[in-house]
Image (cartoon, rainbow, N blue to C red):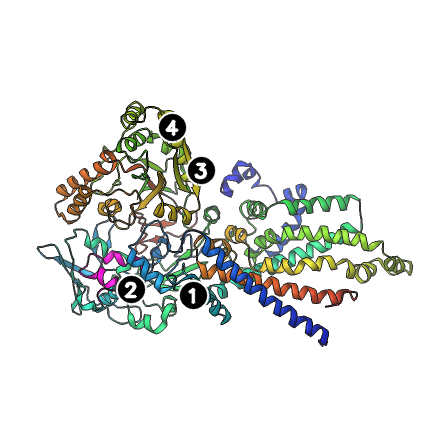
């Protein structure tokens, strides 16, 4: 049941979200038009007459304000327009085909990072200063500082070329998803581990935990029931944006493992100057960030009754 | 560095025979991962499909609409699912394909093609001459906005139609005289016209299919083709599967299927090849030394030239003597060394394998003479030369070459050239609007005729960014294009190339490129050629493993 307060909060946040997306679209339009070079600049030039035909076909000959209006009207209708690079396809179709792939990979990486991060964090947090804590946090620091392409390379090297457990790339069976998911999720997992650890240490000194222990509640129950609920709040804060980042794909990981996701378009759409595709990926990412943040704010209220929606 | 190489460098191959306990002893994290690995692994070596050829085309084909396709990934697919009037053989001579024969009028301006009888599209419809007329009309129609419409500009009135100056297509010089005869009228004689009709953009079109499905007509469920293979499936950004066309006019190909992956990262493609998931990959220049001595390595020349062009309007290169001095101060023989023997040094412009290739032309390395030329140009000392910028697009190979040549100019002429690298599209914009004094460019053949290379530097060419216009050059290249006698043609090209690379020295050609590939031993009859056109209709898989 949604209370009136929450409903009002939701409406307000969604309205703000739309304003944010509109601003993002406008800024993206200005930025991409400001970059030198166009989608049809190629090493092999074609005659001017052909350039005129192409620009007319895609409305690139119109003044800026009219091109902007066209984009905005299209976006409002949910039509992101034709791709300028993939000339027989529309941006909506491209995103519809590639986003689910990035989403699966992102969810796997997300699950991996949360599962590993939270459990390692609790484990270390309950043993502050001991060898397990030090070792775990060293690994976490390594995970944060190791770029995912280095980790990906190492994983391929060991598990594909050396032991041949996994294919080095491609997106065929469940087996081919493991290495990219680990490479993608390891960094965030390490970050979550550090975050959980400090928060567990902080919570373990709190009066309600001491009372629970004094009452003779079993150690597992103390952790799960009394500590985790408040210890997890700082972690939840980053989960929304993290999920949005992971499910929209990673250029490096998709490139390295030859995965047909949308992550690569964050780079290639720009180098190709494929304006509608740049707009498409930027808006998808922004929309996910906006909605993930709303979801996180709602989740706060559930986890910590002291937090109230405003 | 590809993983495999890294792997060898790190000495890890020494452990490859040891049990996996290595991980358990040395790396606790690896043990966890290993556990996941074991739980998922079922069979360690990927299964190799029989009678299927698996290759990497590097990227998603931007379009399989042959009127719009301009890139190599799309073209490699199209050349195996479609055909044109003519097709190159392995010597790059146009031979009959959908046209069984053709005749040329005495003035060299009218070509009459006779269509092969009994050719059927994949939906069973017979091929007619009208399909070609439809295809060419669509290519030239301004609303199609096809980049390669200019391939047909030498057909009478085609250019005017494409520019919207003529609306009536019947005035364009292509007609279906009957269901099997196409008559093409050119605005000037062109000896290489049958080479143009090999090109994907000139393929016949089925307007009924295109109109029915709109932009989606190239998807596997809609597309109608007539080549040796059919488009079976297309998972965008990932892979394309082709299957043998049982109704191909020359009989179905021996191979059952072709799988084309779109692996952009060359290291990944090499890893896949090494793990037997691919049968054919290209090798990046830096990795050549690691594969050079292997029996599955193949190298062959590629019709591709690489050059530095001078902006002939900006000092000091507004003076031909200065241009000659700079070209002469380059020792091109070092280039193969820095590029792992993947190139052939060049001082002339027409590549080997084409009529008119004359390696003797061009500025030969002579630092003393080069310094003398610079003095004659009025620059008595290096300090009197205005600051010079050499621009190239950001890329490892271009960087290697530029740094080497910068050093050579410093040593041989005493001139310090500033290097300026930039992103590709920014670079293209710059050389179009305000070319720097020196800039890098290359040219890959569209069709295997010297005209394709020489026409780049015509006064009205959109690819000539040197701001050099020379009526004599234009005349020589024009004469050569219309000259049926090979000897005379060669003479025209000889003089034109001397003008381009010696007398006026507009460009300093540096090298001709090569193709470097790994081909699995289970592959037989893979026809590699200097155009990098990959016809798979003869290809066979021997079976067995690497």
Whether residue B505 appears in magenta in the rendering, the answer is no
**Side of A296 where B269 appears, left or right:** left
Chain of the residue under label 1:
A
The image position of residue A137, as x and y in percent, is 72, 46
Q: Nearer the viewer, residue B35 or B528?
A: B528
> Gap in Å between the C-alphas at discs 3 and 2?
49 Å
Q: Earlier in the sequence, mark 3 or mark 4?
A: 3
Give the side of residue A71 with respect to residue A187, left or right: left
**Picture residue at 69% right of the left edge, 47% below the top:** A140
- Residue B290 is marked as 3
What secondary structure is marked by label 1? helix
1 and 3 marks on the same chain: no
Q: Work out whether residue A95 can be spotted.
A: yes
Check contact, mark 4 vs mark 2: CB within 8 A: no
Residue bearing mark 1: A66
User: Marks 1 and 2: same chain?
Assistant: no
Label placed on residue B142 = 2
Q: Label 1 to label 4, Cα distance in Å?
A: 50 Å
Q: For the residues carrying marks 1 and 3, which lies nearer the camera in this image?
A: 1
Query: Which is nearer the N-term, disc 4 or disc 2?
Result: 2
State the residue position of label 4: B415
Q: Which residues are magenta?
A: B146-166
Label 2 sits on a secondary structure element that is helix
- Report the chain holding disc 3: B
Q: Nearer the viewer, mark 1 or mark 4?
A: 1
Q: Are marks 3 and 2 in contact (CB under 8 Å)?
A: no
- Position of residue B2 in the picture relative to residue B351 (left or right): right
Where is residue A243? Give x, y as percent.
62, 60
């Amino acid at each position: 049941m949604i209370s009136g307060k929450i409903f009002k909060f939701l409406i307000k946040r969604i309205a703000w979200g739309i304003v944010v997306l509109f601003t993002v679209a406008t800024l993206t339009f200005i930025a991409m038009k400001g970059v030198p070079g166009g989608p049809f600049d190629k090493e092999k030039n074609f005659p001017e007459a052909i350039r005129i035909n192409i620009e007319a076909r895609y409305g690139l000959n119109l003044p800026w304000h009219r091109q902007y209006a066209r984009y905005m009207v299209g976006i409002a209708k949910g039509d992101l327009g034709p791709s300028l690079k993939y000339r027989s396809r529309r941006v909506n179709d491209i995103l519809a085909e590639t986003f689910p792939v990035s989403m699966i990979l992102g969810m796997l990486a997300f699950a991996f990072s949360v599962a590993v991060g939270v459990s390692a964090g609790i484990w270390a947090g309950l043993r502050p200063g001991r060898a397990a804590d030090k070792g775990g946090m060293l690994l976490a620091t390594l995970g944060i500082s190791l770029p995912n392409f280095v980790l990906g390379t190492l994983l391929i090297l060991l598990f594909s070329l050396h032991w041949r457990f996994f294919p080095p790339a491609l997106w065929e069976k469940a087996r081919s998803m493991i290495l990219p998911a680990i490479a993608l999720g390891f960094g965030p997992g390490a970050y979550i581990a550090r975050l959980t650890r400090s928060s567990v240490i902080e919570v373990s000194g709190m009066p309600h935990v001491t009372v629970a222990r004094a009452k003779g509640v079993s150690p597992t129950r103390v952790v799960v029931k009394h500590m985790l609920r408040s210890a997890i709040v700082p972690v939840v804060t980053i989960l929304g944006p993290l999920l949005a980042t992971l499910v929209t794909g990673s250029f490096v990981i998709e490139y390295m493992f030859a995965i047909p996701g949308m992550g690569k378009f964050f780079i290639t759409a720009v180098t190709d100057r494929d304006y509608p595709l740049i707009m498409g990926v930027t808006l998808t990412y922004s929309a996910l960030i906006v909605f993930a943040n709303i979801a996180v704010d709602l989740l706060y209220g559930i986890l910590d009754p002291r937090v109230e929606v405003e | 560095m590809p993983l495999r190489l890294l792997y060898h460098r790190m000495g890890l191959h020494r452990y490859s025979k040891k049990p996996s306990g290595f991980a358990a002893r040395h790396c606790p994290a690896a043990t966890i991962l290993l556990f996941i690995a074991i739980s998922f692994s079922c069979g360690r070596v990927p299964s190799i499909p029989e009678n299927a050829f698996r290759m990497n085309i590097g990227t998603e084909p931007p379009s399989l609409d042959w009127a719009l396709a301009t890139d190599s990934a799309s073209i490699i697919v199209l050349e195996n699912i479609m055909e044109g009037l003519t097709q190159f053989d392995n010597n790059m001579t146009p031979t009959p394909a959908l046209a069984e024969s053709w005749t040329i009028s005495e003035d060299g301006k009218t070509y009459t093609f006779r269509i092969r009888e009994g050719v059927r599209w994949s939906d069973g419809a017979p091929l007619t001459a009208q399909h070609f007329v439809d295809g060419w009309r669509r290519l030239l129609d301004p609303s199609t906005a096809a980049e390669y419409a200019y391939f047909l500009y030498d057909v009478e009135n085609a250019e005017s139609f494409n520019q919207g100056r003529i609306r009536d297509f019947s005035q364009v010089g292509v007609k279906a005289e009957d269901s099997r005869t196409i008559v093409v009228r050119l605005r000037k004689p062109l000896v290489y016209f049958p080479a143009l009709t090999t090109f994907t953009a000139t393929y016949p079109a089925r307007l009924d299919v295109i109109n029915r499905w709109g932009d989606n007509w190239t998807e596997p469920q809609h597309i109608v083709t007539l080549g040796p293979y059919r488009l079976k499936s297309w998972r965008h950004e990932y892979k394309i599967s082709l299957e043998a066309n049982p109704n191909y006019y020359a009989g179905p190909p021996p191979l059952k299927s072709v799988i084309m992956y779109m692996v952009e990262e060359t290291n990944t493609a090499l890893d896949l090849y090494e793990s037997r998931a691919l049968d054919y990959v290209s090798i990046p220049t830096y990795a050549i030394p690691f594969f050079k001595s292997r029996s599955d390595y193949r190298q062959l020349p590629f019709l591709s030239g690489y050059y530095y062009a001078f902006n002939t309007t900006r000092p000091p290169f507004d003076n031909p003597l200065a241009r000659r001095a700079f070209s002469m101060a380059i020792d091109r023989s070092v280039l193969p060394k820095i590029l792992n023997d993947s190139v052939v040094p060049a001082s002339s412009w027409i590549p080997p394998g084409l009529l008119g290739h004359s390696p003797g032309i061009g500025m030969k390395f002579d630092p003393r003479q080069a310094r003398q030329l610079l003095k004659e140009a009025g620059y008595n000392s290096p300090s009197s030369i205005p600051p010079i910028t050499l621009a190239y697009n950001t890329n490892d190979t271009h960087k290697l070459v530029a740094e080497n040549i910068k050093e050579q100019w410093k040593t041989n002429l005493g001139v310090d050239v500033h290097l300026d690298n930039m992103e590709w599209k920014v670079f293209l914009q710059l050389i179009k609007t305000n070319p720097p004094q020196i800039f890098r460019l290359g040219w890959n053949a569209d069709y295997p005729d010297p005209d394709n290379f020489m026409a780049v530097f015509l006064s009205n060419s959109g690819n000539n960014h040197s701001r050099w216009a020379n009526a004599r050059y234009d005349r020589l290249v024009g004469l050569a294009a219309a000259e049926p006698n090979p000897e005379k043609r060669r003479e025209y090209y000889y003089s034109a190339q001397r003008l381009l690379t010696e007398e006026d020295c507009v460009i300093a050609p540096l090298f001709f490129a090569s193709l470097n590939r790994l081909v699995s031993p289970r592959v037989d009859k893979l026809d590699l050629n200097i155009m990098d056109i990959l016809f798979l209709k003869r290809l066979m898989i021997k079976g067995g493993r690497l």
